[in-house]
Amino acid sequence: MMKTLSAKSQNGTNQMNRIKGISMRRYLIVGTAILATVLAPAGLGLSGCTKSSENKAAAPAAQATGQRAPIRSDNNKSTAIKASSELDKSGEKKVDGKESEETAVTLTPDEVRTAGIQVTALTLQKLSGQVRVTAMIEANQDALAHIAPRVAGRIVRVQANLGDVVKAGQALAVLDSIDLGDARSAYRTAQTELSLARANFNRLDGLYREQVIAQKDWLAAHADYEKAKSVSRAAADKLRLLGVAPGGDGSTFPVTAPFAGMVIEKNAVLGELAPADQSLFTVANLSTVWIESDLYEKDLGGIQVGAPAQVRVAAYSNTVFEGKLTYISSTVDPHTHTIKGRIEVHNPRLALKPGMFANVTLVSGNQVEEWAVPETAIILFKGEPSVFRAVGNRFEPQAVQTGAYVNGYVVIRSGLKTGDRVVTAGAYQLKARLMKSSIGDSD
């Protein structure tokens, strides 16, 4: 009987312990939930809790604050992947799976007509063969003069500066020369002696005709007269050699321009002594300029003297200067295996300056077929040569690789295909609209 009561008592004790254990676990779970509810708004977490406990603890906190429970790691990854998929490879955001249309311009038919936009399909063009060379612009050597005095002298006046346009015979500077003073003095002395010799001869010639004096006296007077004339002519010639006309007075003389042109070099300094071999000014007529270039042997078969030439310089990238090939050397440089050629270009507005680098296209007699568009179709967009491709009433820029410029056309190496409709007039208006819309979107 006692054993039976003892066993029952032990069983009751074990049952109570299990009930207490269950209660303690419940209290821990409830306490954890309450603590999570208090700490969740402050962004704090509990260490040592499992992911499921954190999720269970966050749910009541979210309900208390009126927010949705945060999505844990796996869901965050999928959200990030979804967000990144909304960006295309170029970093531009897509809207409903379509690229942003910031790189295109859409116009109505009336806007197209107002802007003067013309569209042409890309086709093969028959173009003359061409040879492209780089060269340097030089002054026309047939219209270039280095002006130096013929006699040494001190510069007493400077009357021309760099860039001045001068006329033929215009004084550029005035020099004072001792040698010129001596020459003019000698000329005046010779003129005086000539006058005396002429008067003496005339007097004796009359007496000789009247047979008052002997013939030898007449011959002596005639000899003195002829000698005086010779000395006078020599003195006058020396003045002409010095660059001044006979006559005049003093020791000063002007340095003058031999023809009309521009002063492109000046070495005259007031007060300095100018030797006879020192150039004081350089005057050039720049209405025509020369372009010296090196031609390769392989190109000689297609070009000849008189071939048309197109010249471009960086300063005027949209301007083509017309010229022609006027000279091909008869010898080949043994070191570079090139041949000197000269292109002469008219320069009425003096836009081309000696020393500029130039790109020259020489047109040969051979004809080739190339994919080409008019030069007006080419624009610079994002630092690359581009054209506007028309798709209906939508115009989008397309980068292209260009080749030679021939007779107003630009060869297209890549970037377009046969039949593409390209804007040949109004490309700059489209670029302006595109840039304006981009600035507006950025605001």
Image (cartoon, rainbow, N blue to C red):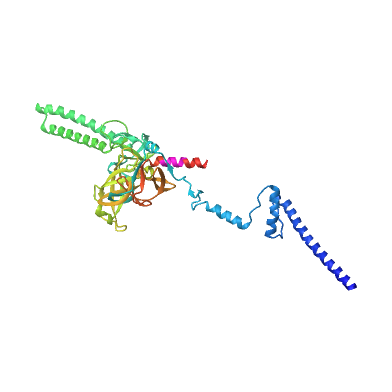
- Name the spot of residue 330 as percent of width and height, x first: 24, 53
User: Is residue 137 visible to us here?
Assistant: no
- Name the spot of residue 77 as percent of width and height, x first: 59, 56
The image shows residue 190, relative to residue 333, as above or below, that is above
The image shows residue 88, relative to residue 319, as above or below, that is below
Pick the residue in front: 334 or 16. Answer: 16
- Provide the residue span drawn in magenta: 430-436
Residue farthest along the front direction in this orientation:
1
State yes or no: residue 435 in magenta: yes
Q: Quadrant of the N terminus?
A: bottom right
Residue found at x 69% / y 60%: 50
Tell whether 239 sits left or right of 267: left
- Name the spot of residue 178 as percent of width and height, x first: 33, 37
Residue farthest along the right direction in this orientation:
2
Pick the residue in front: 77 or 166. Answer: 77
State yes or no: residue 23 in magenta: no
| Magenta segment main secondary structure | helix
- Name the spot of residue 278 as percent of width and height, x first: 34, 43
Tally the numbered discs: 0
User: Is residue 65 visible to us here?
Assistant: yes
Pick the residue in front: 173 or 56. Answer: 56
Tell whether 7 sits left or right of 28: right
Residue found at x 37% / y 34%: 156
Give the quadrant of residue 117: top left
The image shows residue 9, relative to residue 105, as above or below, that is below
Tell whether 56 sits left or right of 109: right
